Amino acid sequence: MRKANDRALAGRAAAGQEAALAELYDRYADMLYAFVTQLIRDPRTEADDIWQETWLAAIRSLPAYDSRKSGFFTWLCGIARHKAADSRRSVARRPSEPLSSVSDDRSLSLMDRSPLPESVLESNAVRAAVIEALADLPPGYRRMLVARYADGASVREAAEMEGKSYKAAESCLERARRAFRRALNKKMGEAHAE
C-alpha cells in the first residue's frame, strides 16, 4: 500500500504538485537524514549538506524515478550514497584526520538510530537485530562492513580509509563478516524467543 502511495505521490510531485512533494518530504526526511549520518565517517563532511544535496537531486530527478525498479526511499538512499561518495572524493583531496579521532560512541549512536533501506529490511525486528549486531562488533569490523556494504566502497578503498594493506583489509573484512553473521544469528534467535 505504501509503495503504491509513494508511486502516486512521486508522479504528482514530478508533475509539479507541491503538496505531493511536501508529503514525500514529511514521510522520508528524518529517515533519510538518519541514513546519511550513517554514511558519514569523516568529521569534516557535513551530513546536512549531503542530505540537502540528496533532496535537491531527487527533486530534479523525480521525472526519471521508476517505481518498478525500487521503492522511493531506496531510490533516495541511492542518491544519498552517490552524494556521500562525491563528498568523500572531495574530502580525500584535503589533509585527512585519522579515523581514531572519531569516537566510537559517536559512530555507535549514529548506527543505533539509523534505519536501513526498506527493500533490504522489511520488518522492525530484523532491522533492530541488524543494528544491534553491528553495534556489538568491534569498531574496526563495524567500520569495514559499513564502508564496504553500506557505502559501496571497494576493498581497496576500505583499506585506504582504515590505513591497512589490501590483504589486511581483505582478512579483516572476512573476519568482520563472520563476526557479524554470528552476532546477527544470536540477535535473531533472541528476537524469535521473545
Image: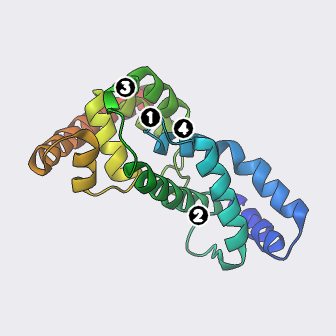
Alpha carbon distance from label 2 to label 3: 32 Å
Foreground mark, 2 or 3, reads: 3
Q: Nearer the viewer, residue 146 or 192?
A: 146
| Mark with earlier residue (2, 4) | 2
In the image, what residue occupies the spot 26% across and 35% down?
Answer: 141
Please tell me which of labels 1 and 3 falls first in the chain: 3
Three-letter residue code for mark 3? Ser
Indicate the amino acid at tag 1: Ile
Mark linked to residue 114 = 4
Q: Residue at x 17, y 42 (%)?
A: 164
How busy is the neighbourhood of tag 3: few (under 14 within 10 Å), some, or many (20 plus)? Answer: few
Q: Is residue 194 visible?
A: no
Q: Which residue is mark 3?
A: 101
Name the residue tied to disc 1.
131
Residue shown at 40% from the left, 47% from the top:
94
Asked whether, in this view, residue 18 is left or right of residue 95, the answer is: right
The picture places residue 49, in percent across and down from the top left corner, at 62, 48
**How far apart are the alpha carbons under marks 4 and 3?**
21 Å
Which numbered disc, 1 or 3, marks the residue closer to the eye?
Answer: 3
Q: Does the CB distance between marks 4 and 1 fall below 8 Å?
A: yes
Identify the secondary structure beneath mark 2: helix
Label 4: element kind:
loop
Which residue is disc 2 drawn over?
A: 75
Amino acid type at mark 4: Ser
Which mark sits nearer the N-terminus, 4 or 1? 4
Q: Quadrant of residue 115?
A: top right
Disc 1: CA contacts within 10 A as few (<14), some (14-19) or many (>=20) = some
For label 2, count other residues whose C-alpha is less than 10 Å away and answer few (under 14), some (14-19) or many (20+).
some
- What's the distance in space between the residues labelled 4 and 1, CA to CA? 8 Å
